[in-house]
Image: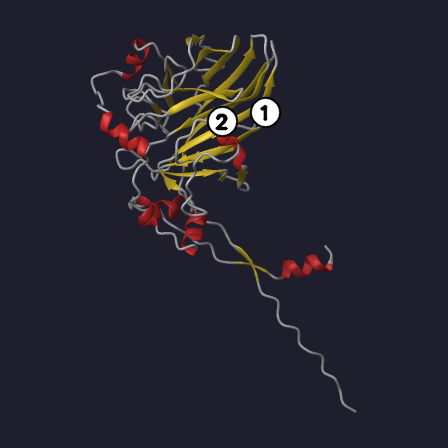
Amino acid sequence: MNNLTKSIASLLILHPVIAFSATADNSLSSYLKDYHPESYIAAQKNGVDFSALELQEPNINNIEGMALEEPRHDVNPGKYCEKSGGIFLENNFIATCVSEDGTFGNGDLPLGMTFNPSGTGTINTSDYLRPGTPFEYFSVKFNNQLFTNNNSNGVNPLFDDIPATKTSRLNRHSTTQEGGVLVKSTINHQNSQLDITQKYTVDPNSREIIVRVEMKNTGRSIFKNMTYARGLDPDQDQPNTFHTLNKRGHTYYPASGKPVHIAPDNIAWASGKKGLSVALYSVDPVSHNTCISSTWTTDPMQILSQKCGSNFLYEKINYSDSTINIAFKLGSLKPNQTKVFSFKYLFNQEKPRLIGPIVRPIPLPKPVPELVSKR
């Protein structure tokens, strides 16, 4: 250790641990205290008005959906999904319908996307997708043309322009996977053809849905600037609110060891005030990025360039009715060429925690002038 390092080390002190205990308070400030104390401290320093954030109106898309939605309670979620042409995908933690167009969910009917952190079944648990206007999409853009499918079984089928989708159940293997669904879509464009194959799997006792996407040019012309996007409007705190705490990048705290930081381009994350969270996550080598969208964009280029209508009222806190999104940049796709990439939907139940010691430097003392003796 050199003298400079020693000097810096001697100027660091550990301040006392700041502890927050979990309470029955269901406010945003209480949630941040219990689950994200660093964010709470930063928000206080920035003068964030927590009440104003909580009183914001839902996104206009959800307001319109609320007026149209007529929830049904006479349908068994598992059986209805099969009868509608979709396929039920589940393990003990996660359940969803893979709809006829290849998106997740079953419109305004059961089942959207549910998660039970106890792992004891998923039918009568919090639904992330169904409330308001169900919004879970995938989109493809190439040659400056956008194609999108967005939960076609719903009450607001505005985006359904990827035709010829076929869904099939993958074989179950108890030792390797709980179940899987294969989705095949075809886009015909200017006398050429793009085949999209998406494989959705859930492993036993897993809290994630693994998505593998294969895109193949089966035509005769080059597809330029090929991109893909996936997104979700998470509403797991309904019937209380459509809002979630949203951010790009995430830090989690293992039971032992140092905090683990995930880069913003690898994860878009949303949590409710009860600690239920969902994220779109990827570390695939194919170039990708994430975005929080207040306008519910489906354009991959807007997500990749961070121009997806995000409205961050405060630098550190985004508590709003927004969507989480991830997009991939594949470049040109030549005839007979195939490109493959993958990502995950991650589900979790956050735990209250204490903030650790805060290391702060002590200001350096002012130099004392040397005494000069007079003769």
Residue under circle 1? Answer: 286
Q: Nearer the viewer, residue 348 or 156?
A: 156
Residue at image position (28%, 24%) is 124
Q: Residue lying furthest right in this view?
A: 375
Q: Secondary structure at mark 2?
A: helix
The type of residue carrying mark 1 is Val
Q: Residue lying furthest front in this view?
A: 190
Is residue 302 depicted above or below 355 in this figure?
Answer: above
Is residue 99 depicted above or below 13 in this figure?
Answer: above
Q: x, y (%) of residue 48? A: 38, 52
Q: Nearer the viewer, residue 360 or 143?
A: 143
Q: x, y (%) of residue 328? A: 54, 25
Q: Are marks 2 and 1 in contact (CB under 8 Å)?
A: no
Which of the image's four quarters has the C terminus?
Answer: bottom right
Is residue 79 depicted above or below 49 in this figure?
Answer: above
Q: x, y (%) of residue 167? A: 41, 9
Residue 93 visible in image: no
Mark number displayed over residue 300? 2
User: To which quarter of the image does residue 217 belong?
Assistant: top right
Q: Secondary structure at mark 1?
A: loop
Is residue 104 depicted above or below 13 in this figure?
Answer: above
Q: Nearer the viewer, residue 319 or 305?
A: 305
Other-residue count near label 2 (Cα within 10 Å), few / some / many at <14 / 14–19 / ≥20: many
Q: Left of 372 or right of it: where is 49? A: left
